Image (cartoon, helix red, strand yellow):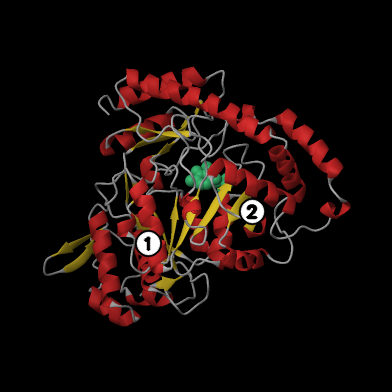
Amino acid sequence: MIKSVNLDPWEQVAQHLGVDLYLDLQPDPSGSARWRGARRRQSLATALRASISDGRLAPGTRLPPYRSLAADLGLARGTVAAVYQELIAEGWLVARQGSGTHVADTPRPDLPKPMTRQRKTPDTVHDFGLGQPNSSLFPRTEWIAATRRAITAAPDRAFGPGDPQGSERLRVSLAGYLARARGVRTHPDDIVLTTSVMHALDLLSRSVFGDVLAVESHGLPFHRAVIERGGTVTTPVPIDNDGADIDQLPTDVSAVLLTPSHQFPTGVALSPPRRAAAIEWAGDHDGLIVEDDYDGELRYDREPVGALQALNPDAVIYTGSVSKSLSPAVRIAWLVLPPRLVDRVRAAKGPREPDASIIDQLVLAELIDSGAYDRHIRRSRQYYRRRRDHLTDAFARAGVTIPGIAAGLHAVIPLSAETEHVVFEAAARRRYALAAMSQYRHPHADGGSVVPPGLVVGFGTPAASTYHADVSALVSLVAEDAPNP
Ligand SMILES: Cc1ncc(COP(=O)(O)O)c(C=O)c1O
């Protein structure tokens, strides 16, 4: 007999598994009775994995036959069978001929222990943290000067409650900037300002996404988490050297989240045929593409790849922020929407701007309009190009080629699948802040992706005074712990 901690439909799961166990089941965030296949499957798989990994389902425990579990729970047999197969493939369960499905004797023997991304702590020695530019580059003088001008010129009404769509002045500036810098086609009325891309995804999951959203098989786990909290299940689409494999989009999805200019974390760009395929898919299926253009301006060797949004502004939602160009501390981001979606997203914010500082939005508008933002981007591009070159040269001398296009603020140091975990653990012991590719894998990604295992490092983060030493230390670490990567 199982006791469940949640009083939701999944309590039934707990009551029918036939062993004494608490299951930490995901409640239905929308409270809706419309539990679709993907959500059922994902919740059951997550609950079983959690029960096995924390020992509540002991090695060797026999699970009920999937047919009877499906009948007891009112689930499709195929759903339970698919979950059992998935957990067998992952090494959690084993099928024994004639005696059903059991918890493996050493669950997941072939997979490394879960790793958590190494964040910067006071003890960090080599800071290759992700998700931020170099702090010393923040244009303090220009920001202060822009603040003075923006506040002096702002009309009194600028200091009242904010429009949930965000400052009109910044929307006008951004519409112009995104058009000239990224090729985005929009009107200020079709922009909704947010505090971050994460906030933008949160708003979309509460207002636009349906039950299921396809996402790249490797991406930011906290982006998936915020989408799932809003009630949308994420399902992985494989990626390879051409970006997301659009032909493999599941048939039941009507929206997909992509990083077309610079796949995060592999660093590849969505190839021209795949860009065309994505736009065609949206046209044929009445589908939506969400384009996360998180570092589109930071491109070093090549002509910029323009925004996918320009190919069909009615089918693509474009999002970006200043987290990589200025600082994640500024908290300004944007959603460029097909006009038909603006009211829905705006309504999800409520009657007034609930989170963002309209004052800071005015300052950013002033920074853009004065040309200071463009100058800052050009300076940053040169700075990071030098850093990127130093990193690739240092690894090239050690015989390691860094894959991906020369863009953005992160790079992948390729390792074999076997050594990724070893080197990551060694890095953690020596107090590096960095990440491993496998940490970005969607839990349901089935191995159909072509993704280089390795370390994911933020090369913008280290201080200028230590950058060369940090890179040398990283090369030595990789050479010592993975001599033939
Ligand atoms: C893939 C990806 N998307 C978006 C962002 C921007 O995030 P935010 O605007 O939420 O700070 C980042 C920043 O690290 C990122 O890596």
Q: Can residue 217 be seen in this view?
A: no
The answer to whether 254 appears left or right of 121 in the picture is: left
At x 33%, y 45%, the residue is 242
At x 29%, y 21%, the residue is 399
Q: Which residue bears the numbered disc 1?
A: 281
Could you say which disc has been placed on residue 21 in the image? none
Q: Where is residue 136 in the image (x, y as percent from the top left)?
A: 63, 27
Q: Is residue 258 visible?
A: yes
Type of amino acid under label 2 = Thr
* Other-residue count near label 2 (Cα within 10 Å), few / some / many at <14 / 14–19 / ≥20: many
**Label 1 element class:** helix
Callout 2: CB less than 8 Å from ligand 1:
no
Q: Which of marks 1 and 2 is nearer the N terminus?
A: 2
Q: Quadrant of the N terminus?
A: bottom left
Q: In which quarter of the image is the C terminus?
A: top left
Q: Which residue bears the numbered disc 2?
A: 194
Q: Position of residue 124 (x, y in %)?
A: 52, 29
Q: Nearer the viewer, mark 1 or mark 2?
A: 1
**Label 2 element class:** strand
The answer to whether 289 appears left or right of 107 in the picture is: right
